[in-house]
Image: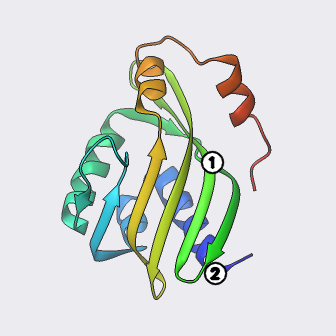
Amino acid sequence: MSKKFEIMKALIAAWTAGDIDGALGFMTDDIVWHCAAAVAPPIKGKDKARKFLDRFKADITEVRWRLFDYGERGDRLFVEGVDEFRTNAGHLVAAPYAGVLTFRGELICDWRDYVDVGVMDAQRRGEGRSAWVAEMIERPAL
């Protein structure tokens, strides 16, 4: 297992445990994070990343973020997985996604998540997920 992937798994463990400081500890102070690339502007800087994570954490009750595959090239880590969480309203949201993370040393300095926000919004409204999304996200995680 690569060092970058180990760092990503440690970040996921921190976030799953609700440890925002722990998750932010894997990012540079000048992180540029596209949490919904091509849909929303990026979050720039660790302070803004903290505000985003604080708001997100307040809206969810549990997290089951899983990765299915990864690859590396130079200072980049490419991951495929599912972002899954339960909202305070009780709706289960699970969306397949891909991420591209750029590292500066052992810290993430640029992060682009590619996710279908429409799939997530429908599930937030309680509409459930399609059979093909269910099939994609039920694969074994690493």
Q: Residues under labels 1 and 2: Cα distance?
A: 18 Å
Say how the picture is coloured: rainbow
Which of the pair 76/47 is nearer the observer?
Answer: 76
What is the secondary structure assignment of the residue under circle 1?
Answer: strand
Residue 59 visible here: yes
- Residue 29: name its quadrant: bottom left
Residue receiving disc 1: 81
Residue receiving disc 2: 3
Mark 2 crowd level (few <14, some 14–19, many ≥20, 10 Å Cα): few
Which quadrant is the C terminus positioned in?
Answer: bottom right
Residue 6 visible here: no
Which of the pair 8/90 is nearer the observer?
Answer: 8
Q: Is residue 28 left or right of residue 66?
A: left
Q: Earlier in the sequence, mark 1 or mark 2?
A: 2
**Residue 8 position in % (x across, y down):** 56, 67
Furthest toward the top, the residue is 127
**Residue 17 position in % (x across, y down):** 50, 53
Question: What residue is shown at x 59% (from left), y 76% (from top)?
Answer: 4
Question: What residue is shown at x 52% (from left), y 51% (from top)?
Answer: 16
The residue under label 1 is which amino acid type?
Gly
What is the secondary structure assignment of the residue under circle 2?
Answer: helix
Mark 1 crowd level (few <14, some 14–19, many ≥20, 10 Å Cα): many
The residue under label 2 is which amino acid type?
Lys
